Amino acid sequence: MPRRVKVPAFSAYLYRFCNPVERFFSKLKHYRAVATRFEKHDPNHLAFVKLAAARIWMRFMGAPTDRGPLRRRHIARSMRV
């Protein structure tokens, strides 16, 4: 099997900040009205995006589970510079 000639650029430092953003947009796309652009007017579509983002945030910050508070602490610790 041939080896790679050019190694792709990867920065663990930058990945630490990009990964949560990519995961958020992935969760945002699960809302059908946002993913399919159900509303044709920009202000209405933006309102749907804001509502979906608020629901995602509330679910993340919501009721504590067995791993909930520890997970938030771990994420906050990993985001420190």
Image: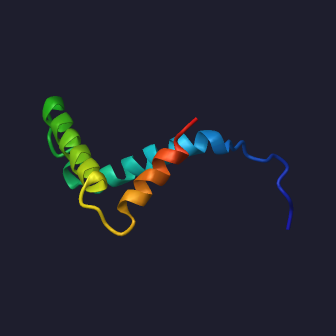
* Rendered position, 30 above or below 17: below
Q: Residue at x 24, y 56 (%)?
A: 62
Give the percent coordinates (x, y) of residue 9: 72, 42
**Quadrant of res 50:** top left
**Quadrant of res 80:** top right
Drawn side of residue 15 relative to residue 49, left or right = right
Give the percent coordinates (x, y) of residue 55: 21, 50
Drawn side of residue 65 relative to residue 20, left or right = left
Q: Which quadrant does the N terminus fall into?
A: bottom right
User: Residue 31 or 54: which is nearer the viewer?
Assistant: 54
Q: Residue at x 43, y 58 (%)?
A: 71
Give the percent coordinates (x, y) of residue 35: 27, 49
Q: Is residue 16 visible?
A: yes
Q: Residue at x 82, y 54 (%)?
A: 4
Q: Residue at x 23, y 41 (%)?
A: 49
User: Residue 57 or 37: which is nearer the viewer?
Assistant: 57
Drawn side of residue 50 relative to residue 23, left or right = left
**Quadrant of res 81:** top right
Q: Is residue 29 visible?
A: no
Drawn side of residue 46 relative to residue 23, left or right = left
User: Residue 42 or 12: which is nearer the viewer?
Assistant: 12
Give the percent coordinates (x, y) of residue 60: 31, 54
Looking at the rendered structure, the number of numbered marks drawn on it comes to 0
* Rendered position, 72 above or below 67: above
